[in-house]
Image: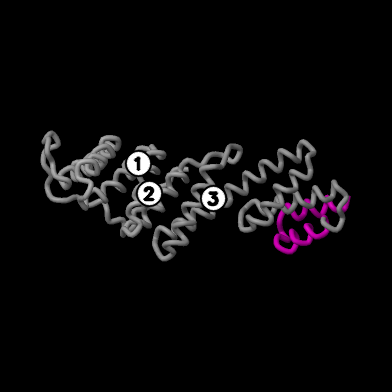
Amino acid sequence: MKKTLLLIGFGLILAGCASAPEEETHRTAEQLYNTAYKQLNKTRYVQAAETFEQVELEHPYSKWATKAKLMGAYAYYKDQKYDDAILSIDRFIKYHPGNKDIAYAYYMKGLCYYEQIVGVEKDQDNTRKAEEAFRQVIVRFPDTDYAKDARLKMDLIADHLAGQEMEVGRYYLKRQNYLSALNRFSEVVNHYQTTEQIEEALYRQVEIYKILGLQKENDDALKVLGHNYPDSKWYKDALKLSKK
């Protein structure tokens, strides 16, 4: 799920004055930073990340070292080395919690997990980590552009997690493990009501209650489905099922 990295308001990617040649041995923090910046612009991401780290190692108390921490993470992110990017971001968050670019750091951490999301049939650990990281952005920095984009991605994440619950629920249903299936569908009904999966989840509740002979629960689920989605194909199917 590759997305373009949001850079609105991101003030770190700033070239300084003309840097010294790369082969120069004793470069200032600013010169090293500018070298890394040029490498980044040339898509030499691994070299850029290593040079940004060199800024930190050789000039740990300079203002450029602080910038380099996050820029190194960005270089790793661009090279799709997400684990390395996350490590760099976590160090930035730990040591510079009051930095003006801290919102961006949390946002980029969410992106690192978000872009590793896999199909609903596989483990969703990265999906949940992306959800938590974006939630931090929304809660801590609600008025930023990063929070705005994080909210949009949270909607997609919710639909994805609901999709996994439905996938597992169908698996149990096919194997006539009705209670386990019902638990999965009910999870969608209770916690993912705004997703695209909700109509089928309600139908599956009706279906399982019908199989188990739980008439009251069947009627209640059918009413909820009909009230909220009267034109849905799932409601029409549920009506037919309930009349059998």
Q: Residue 49: percent from the left, percent from the top?
A: 28, 39
Residue behind mark 3 = 157
Does 234 sit left or right of 121 as displayed? right
State whether residue 196 is above or below residue 77.
below
Residue stretch rendered in magenta on the structure: 218-244
Mark 3: secondary structure? helix
Mark 2: secondary structure? loop
Quadrant location of residue 32? top left
Does 66 sit left or right of 161 as displayed? left
Q: Residues within 10 Å of mark 1 (few under 14, many from 20)?
A: some
Earlier-in-chain disc, 3 versus 1:
1
Q: Amino acid at mark 1?
A: Lys
Mark 1: secondary structure? helix
Q: Residues within 10 Å of mark 2 (few under 14, many from 20)?
A: few
Quadrant location of residue 169? top right
Residue behind mark 2 = 5
Residue at horizontal 39 percent and vertical 60 percent from the top: 145
Q: Residue 85: percent from the left, percent from the top?
A: 37, 42
CA separation in Å, label 2 and label 3: 17 Å
Does 225 sit left or right of 130 as displayed? right
Residue at horizontal 57 percent and vertical 52 percent from the top: 158
Q: Amino acid at mark 2?
A: Leu
CA separation in Å, label 3 and label 1: 22 Å
